[in-house]
């Protein structure tokens, strides 16, 4: 299993606070059946910067530590980049890092709204050969209230990744139900952990896939797992035609 979104790098953001915690997260990931993790530190989120080269260097150090600890886990470089107007310039100047140097870029929205310039920026990003992957859209208040916003972004070429813990109900029943609505409307393409630690923000990947299998069958599980593989290979992912969510429900995050 591949985890495309994880805060396993030590001492860089609100994820692992030291190497020991990174090692413990790695052990937990292997227990979940994960063999590859994309380390995705926050970029330009509150006080975190984590430019490209710094992440690459930290990933190399962590992989060396995992080998010494005899933990069979491979960590790849990535970044969870908070949306900002100069993202294309940031990529060109070496600040922005895609998933393991592929064309796939993880993009984080503010939690409560979608900036007005998003559609134009996504167009510019795609014109520069990159594919934006919106992380945890199921937890964005404006998307929950107006899912057509996400529909139009996906229709125009963006991809999305929902959080395993959302599928499991850890963020509440409403977000769990909305996550399933996104799956059913072909508005998401990946499930990843967004794990931050080994206590309250863990992987939940195996549990999430069990939920998906019970609700949609093995074919949907295969789609999500295969898409993660295709991403790190830099290949095109499987995409069904997106649909609008038919019964829009107004949810609030408490």
Image (cartoon, rainbow, N blue to C red):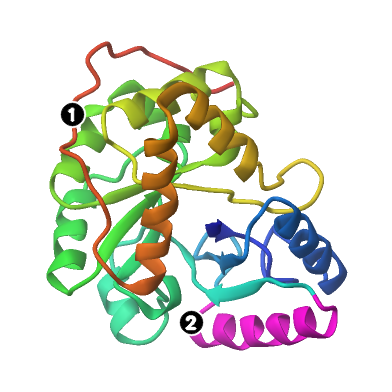
* Residue at (27, 78) in percent of width and height: 89
* Image quarter (top left, top right, bottom left or bottom right) of the N terminus: bottom right
Residue numbers of the magenta segment: 50-70
Label 2 CA crowd tier, 10 Å (few <14, some 14–19, many 20+): many
Determine whether, in the image, residue 100 is placed left or right of residue 172. left
Question: If the image is split into quadrants, where does the C terminus sit?
Answer: top right
- Residue visible at 28% across and 84% down? 92
Q: Nearer the viewer, mark 2 or mark 1?
A: 1
Tell me if residue 239 comes above or below residue 214 in the rendering.
Answer: below
Element class at badge 1: loop
Q: Name the residue at 39% across, 55% down.
A: 226
Q: Residue at x 20, y 59 (%)?
A: 121
Which residue is under mark 2? 52
Q: Within the image, what quadrant is residue 49 found in?
A: bottom right
Q: Position of residue 90 (x, y in %)?
A: 34, 77
Q: Quadrant of the rendered structure where residue 240 is?
A: top left
Q: Which residue is mark 1?
A: 243
Q: Picture coordinates of residue 136 (x, y %)?
A: 46, 42
Q: Is residue 132 left or right of residue 200?
A: left
Q: Is residue 161 visible?
A: no
């Amino acid at each position: 299993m591949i985890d495309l979104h994880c805060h396993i790098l030590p001492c860089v953001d609100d994820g692992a606070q030291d190497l020991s915690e990174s090692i413990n997260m790695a052990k937990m990931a292997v227990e979940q059946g994960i063999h590859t993790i994309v380390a995705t530190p926050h970029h330009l989120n509150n006080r975190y910067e984590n430019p490209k080269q710094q992440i690459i260097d930290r990933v190399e150090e962590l992989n060396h530590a995992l080998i010494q600890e005899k933990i069979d886990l491979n960590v790849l470089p990535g970044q969870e980049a908070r949306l900002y107007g100069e993202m294309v310039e940031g990529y060109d100047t070496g600040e922005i890092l895609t998933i393991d140097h592929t064309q796939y870029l993880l993009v984080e929205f503010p939690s409560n709204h979608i900036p007005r310039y998003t559609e134009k920026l996504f167009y510019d990003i795609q014109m520069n050969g990159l594919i934006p992957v919106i992380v945890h859209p199921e937890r964005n208040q404006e998307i929950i209230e107006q899912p057509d916003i996400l529909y139009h972004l996906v229709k125009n070429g963006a991809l999305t990744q929902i959080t395993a813990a959302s599928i499991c109900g850890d963020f509440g029943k409403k977000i769990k139900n909305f996550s399933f609505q996104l799956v059913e409307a072909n508005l998401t393409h990946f499930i990843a952990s967004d794990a931050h630690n080994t206590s309250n923000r863990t992987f939940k990947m195996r549990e999430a896939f069990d939920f998906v299998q019970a609700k949609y069958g093995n074919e949907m599980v295969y789609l999500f797992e295969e898409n993660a593989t295709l991403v790190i290979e830099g290949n095109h992912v499987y995409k069904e035609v997106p649909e609008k969510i038919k019964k829009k429900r107004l949810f609030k995050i408490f």
